[in-house]
Image (tube, coloured by chain):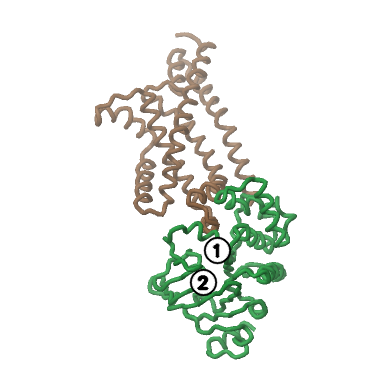
């Protein structure tokens, strides 16, 4: 059974069809990278997996359960699916530690001491243990994004979603975030990411999905897909990002 | 006729207690109501949003003097309920405070980016926890300077209660002025007391604003 099973999903904003019969499977431990031009529906698809967007047709199953914005136990579900955003979305009024421990403290009722240990543990995984008492505004963009990743890790997710997480960063800060993601991939985390980082997609992804106008036009292992694009859309997309 | 004596000054300070009491009543009852209105106004449910908007519009469109008149003179006529001045004035000030603070706090809540709610929701927080721990603290910071500014308005606004015969600072001034026939002196003292009450708040509001802008 795939961890994520997207079956013929469609979604429209008014008369604009953003997802048009998308099907996609993500198996446990896979790193699936969704690429495509802006407006191709890739971010919307990612947000649907976490029930941040309502779908109009089809079905999304995560761990065998149907995902809907009104699904039962939505909050428990969200704790198992971490999502990292382009704009970090850290809580500016809380320290790094509190950003990380807020949800575990409220949802799992861990103590302060356990919270600090948990925060240190996940911060070590993103290389920022020394920033535990800093406020988000005191960190660089790359550091903030790594804290955002650590905040998700503290929930012990089964699946991580990344929505163009390096797009808002200065070029010299992209590498440190990608390195953290590579480490997570190596440790077997299942990841679905939308990205413009073709180098990362090429080297780390187990599967590339090319979307165009709300549809999946091609999918396959990166080496194959980049070497032999079958559709003219992917050919022109690869030419444009090179 | 007699001269202005220490006893007159004392009567002003005794009346000042009632001015302060009115402010406390207005904040004590109006504050929680304002929070409810602000939450309704920013709620996802259209019926709640519209109800709150209508209440805010109506109350803000009526001068505070009108509210005082309505509850003191109007209620006995419309509902046949006789109201003690303190009750009528208390209700009017509460309604006035709720509508203005409600709007100020609504602005604070709306100034917090939608992504903050979303990020909190994605961590599995309940809607109430999203508000309480993520949105409210940020909204509070943004709304604090205008809230303190409104407090100054409120203190000065309590002087209107004198028109329904409620003896607070302004009314006590009228009485002392009539008894001593020294309006200039008496009202100058009254004005100085209001000023002494409001100045620290104004300064506080300004320093808060500067500090919060610097932190951004």
Mark 1 lies on a secondary structure that is: strand
Quadrant in which residue A205 is drawn: bottom right
Q: In which quadrant will I find the C terminus of chain A?
A: bottom right
Task: Judge by depth and name the residue closer to the eye, A234 or A68.
Answer: A68
What residue occupies the far right of the structure in this picture? A130
Q: Which chain is painted in brown?
A: B
* Residue at the spot of label 2: A4
What chain does badge 2 belong to?
A
The local crowd at label 2, few if under 14, some if 14 to 19, many if 20 or more residues have their Cα within 10 Å, is many
Furthest residue in direction top, as rendered = B2
The answer to whether marks 1 and 2 sit on the same chain is yes
- For mark 1, does the 10 Å Cα neighbourhood hold few (<14), some (14 to 19), or many (20 or more) residues? many
Say which mark, if any, is on residue A81: 1
Residue at 27% in and 26% down: B81
Left or right: A242, with A10 as reference point: right
**Label located before the other in sequence (1 or 2):** 2
Residue A97 seen: yes
The picture places residue B2, in percent across and down from the top left corner, at: 47, 8
Chain letter for the green colouring in the rendering: A
Q: Is residue B25 left or right of residue A169?
A: left
Q: Would you place residue B173 above or below residue A225 in this image?
A: above
Query: Relative to the observer, which residue lies in front, B194 or A168?
Result: A168
Q: What SS does tag 2 mark?
A: strand
User: Measured from the top left, where is residue B209 in percent x and y?
Assistant: 60, 44
What residue lies at 52% left-to-right and 51% top-to-bottom? B130
């Amino acid at each position: 059974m795939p961890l994520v099973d997207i079956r013929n999903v469609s979604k429209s904003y008014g008369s604009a069809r953003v997802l048009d019969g998308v099907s996609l499977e993500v198996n446990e431990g896979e790193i699936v990278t969704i690429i495509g031009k802006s407006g191709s529906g890739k971010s919307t698809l990612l947000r649907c997996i976490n029930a941040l967007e309502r779908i109009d047709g089809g079905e999304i199953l995560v761990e065998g359960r149907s995902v809907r914005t009104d699904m039962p136990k939505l909050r428990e579900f969200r704790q198992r699916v971490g999502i990292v955003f382009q704009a970090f979305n850290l809580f500016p009024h809380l320290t790094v530690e509190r950003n990380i421990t807020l949800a575990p403290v409220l949802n799992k009722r861990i103590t302060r001491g356990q919270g600090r240990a948990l925060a240190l543990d996940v911060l070590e995984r993103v290389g920022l243990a020394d920033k535990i008492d800093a406020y988000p505004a005191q960190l660089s963009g790359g550091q903030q994004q790594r804290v955002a990743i650590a905040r998700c890790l503290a929930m012990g997710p089964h699946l991580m979603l990344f929505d163009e997480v390096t797009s808002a960063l200065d070029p010299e800060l992209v590498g440190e975030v990608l390195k953290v993601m590579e480490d997570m991939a190596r440790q077997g985390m299942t990841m679905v990411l939308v990205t413009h980082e073709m180098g990362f997609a090429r080297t780390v992804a187990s599967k590339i999905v090319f979307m165009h106008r709300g549809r999946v036009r091609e999918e396959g292992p990166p080496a194959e897909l980049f070497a032999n694009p079958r559709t003219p859309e992917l050919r022109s997309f690869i030419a444009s990002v090179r | 006729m007699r001269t202005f004596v220490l006893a007159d000054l004392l009567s002003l300070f005794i009346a000042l207690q009632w001015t302060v009491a009115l402010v406390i009543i207005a904040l004590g009852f109006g504050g929680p109501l304002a929070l409810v209105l602000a939450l309704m106004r920013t709620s996802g449910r259209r019926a709640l949003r519209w109800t709150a908007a209508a209440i805010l519009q109506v109350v803000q469109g009526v001068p505070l003097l009108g509210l005082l008149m309505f509850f003191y003179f109007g209620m006995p006529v419309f509902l046949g309920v006789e109201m003690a001045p303190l009750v009528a004035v208390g209700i009017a000030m509460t309604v006035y405070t709720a509508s203005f603070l409600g709007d100020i706090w609504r602005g604070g809540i709306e100034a917090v980016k939608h992504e903050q709610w979303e990020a909190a929701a994605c961590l599995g927080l309940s809607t109430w926890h999203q508000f309480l721990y993520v949105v409210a603290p940020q909204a509070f910071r943004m709304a604090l300077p205008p809230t303190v500014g409104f407090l100054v308005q409120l203190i000065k606004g309590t002087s209107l209660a004198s028109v329904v015969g409620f003896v607070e600072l302004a009314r006590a001034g009228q009485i002392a002025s009539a008894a001593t026939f020294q309006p200039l002196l008496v009202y100058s003292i009254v004005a100085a007391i209001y000023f002494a009450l409001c100045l620290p708040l104004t300064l506080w509001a300004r320093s808060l604003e500067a500090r919060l802008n610097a932190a951004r």
